[in-house]
Image (tube, coloured by chain):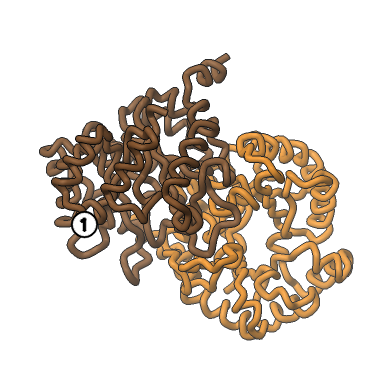
Chain colours: A orange, B brown
């Protein structure tokens, strides 16, 4: 339980105060925050509240979307907010194809340049950028960063304390290389965070909402969890679920349920005992 | 035009005779056939009809689905049919996770074993198996073979004249490695075919029907076509579209439209003139 974190969007009806209270009441030690509710509550107040509540901020969501006008100022603001909150990382959802363009290769090139542009600013503020490779179903509209290999290749140009990767089970479970690339991410000191949620089949009509509670989808979490442990990652494990049913449920029930699923589906697979089985 | 092929499922309302007649009438020199309409028409009759019409059979769809009971007999039957038709390859859609299982790694292992089991049978009949990597959105329910790299790794254990790969733009456009792996496929003599259709955004609720006429989706065909040409592939280019609107349209109009789109969107990108631009 000590490594469990909850991403705020999982219980998105809660404002910052109720979300922090809920985490504390459930004995959850870390939280992933979102910029919009933080802005609504007030950045300085949110920083004080989470610190006083003893909550680690496992991530801030999100920067990126480098194809949008104003992306540079917006990402600098996100870096400032991550610094103020003491977030372990700022998650970057890099964005899809620019409007009316099919130029995937150009979008990927621009992404790499945008990250390079942000690195000095983030480094000066001791903020770690977390590149999040996304499931290829989102390539056109949300993230042209599609595999962990690609994310690590982009990160390689920058210091690991400033540019890491977010390993999200939902996005990466299908990748035949995922365990090998998690091992590489460990060796290269790039693992900025580990997010879990399940992959629903069939996907809902809005594929963005295809995330489910761990155990309710098709992901075999064991091998990926063991790879993350073997790679030396001992940080927070953040539950991030976008799902219409989860959002419609009572947030307190959702927090209780995700704790239980974390314990039964995830925690055991992360233990080093499991790891020794792997090498036996 | 001389390399254009049409996959039968693009105009699926047509039986074998009307399909072959349509291809001939439109000056299309090759066709990808499906087993079900071929069986309905009669295998020997279909072989005679296509031969007499002067149509090359660019592929037979499909074998695979190795998780299903009876897969071995069914795939052997498919190989026999491909031999009878003189098809350039038998397309293998390998299948997703077995029912009620999340064991992706086991399914991938079984896939490799199933292919190894089929190779002697296919080799004896001079049939080439075409491993088709599929978009990761289909990983759970249709194809645990997800990338061209993975397909080439599986193929590597077998002779290239018996095991090749199907390069399908719809499935592979998002892959940051796709051009490099197409180059590898050429060097390793593995390219069994090249299929084109566009990737629709937003995806329809049934993601299987997310294919569109070339030009109507988000794919930038140029780089992939040039990579296929640079890899030395000079075979048929098969248009394969699963799309409710295309299926509802008059098949003759569909054949006319795809010819036009092939000429405006694809053919020019395949020319070696384009290739010399690439290296200029």
- Whether residue A227 appears in this view of the structure is no
Q: Is residue B30 visible?
A: yes
Nearer-the-camera pick, A78 or B34: B34
Dot 1: chain letter: B
Could you say where residue A142 lies in the image, as x and y percent from the top left? Answer: 65, 52
Determine whether, in the image, residue B258 is placed left or right of residue A81.
left
Residue plotted at (62% across, 51% down): A132
Whether residue B258 is situated above or below residue B13 in the rendered picture: above
Q: Position of residue B25 (x, y in %)?
A: 36, 37
In-image side of A250 versus A278 (left or right) = right
Disc 1 crowd rating (10 Å Cα; few below 14, some 14-19, many 20+) is few
Relative to B176, does residue A261 appear above or below in the rendering? below
Check the image and report above or below for A266 versus A18. Answer: above
Q: Farthest residue toward the left?
A: B124
Task: Check the picture and name the quadrant holding the C terminus of chain A.
Answer: bottom left
Q: Residue at x 36, y 44 (%)?
A: B7
**B28, A243: nearer the viewer:** B28
Residue drawn at the location 38% of the way across and 41% of the way down:
B6
Residue A21 appears at what percent x and percent y? 75, 80
Q: In what quadrant of the picture does the N terminus of chain A appear? A: bottom right
Where does label 1 land, which residue?
A: B40
Mark 1 element type = helix
Observer-nearest of A200 and A184: A200
Q: Quadrant of residue A40?
A: bottom right
Return the residue nearer the eye: A180 or B216: B216
């Amino acid at each position: 339980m000590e490594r469990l974190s909850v991403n705020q969007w999982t219980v998105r009806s809660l404002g910052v105060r109720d979300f922090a209270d809920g985490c504390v009441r459930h004995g959850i030690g870390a939280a992933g925050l979102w910029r919009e509710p933080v802005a609504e509550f007030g950045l300085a107040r949110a920083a004080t509240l989470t610190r006083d509540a003893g909550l680690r901020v496992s991530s801030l969501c999100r920067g990126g979307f480098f194809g949008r006008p104003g992306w540079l100022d917006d990402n600098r603001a996100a870096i400032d907010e991550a610094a103020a909150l003491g977030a372990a990382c700022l998650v970057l959802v890099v964005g899809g194809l620019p409007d009316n363009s099919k130029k995937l290769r150009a979008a990927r090139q621009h992404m790499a340049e945008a990250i390079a542009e942000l690195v000095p600013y983030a480094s000066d503020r001791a903020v770690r950028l977390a590149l999040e490779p996304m499931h290829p179903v989102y390539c056109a509209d949300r993230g042209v960063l599609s595999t962990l290999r690609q994310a690590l290749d982009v990160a390689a140009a920058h210091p690991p304390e400033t540019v890491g990767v977010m390993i999200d089970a939902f996005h990466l479970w299908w990748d035949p290389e995922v365990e090998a690339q998690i091992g590489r991410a460990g060796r290269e000191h790039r693992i900025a965070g580990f997010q879990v949620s399940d992959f629903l089949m069939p996907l809902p009509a809005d594929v963005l909402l295809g995330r489910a509670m761990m155990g309710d989808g098709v992901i075999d979490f064991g091998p990926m969890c063991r790879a993350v442990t073997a790679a030396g990652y001992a940080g927070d494990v953040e539950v991030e679920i976008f799902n219409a049913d989860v959002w419609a449920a009572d947030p307190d029930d959702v927090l209780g349920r995700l704790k239980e699923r974390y314990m039964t589906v995830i925690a055991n697979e992360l233990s080093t005992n499991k790891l020794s089985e792997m090498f036996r």
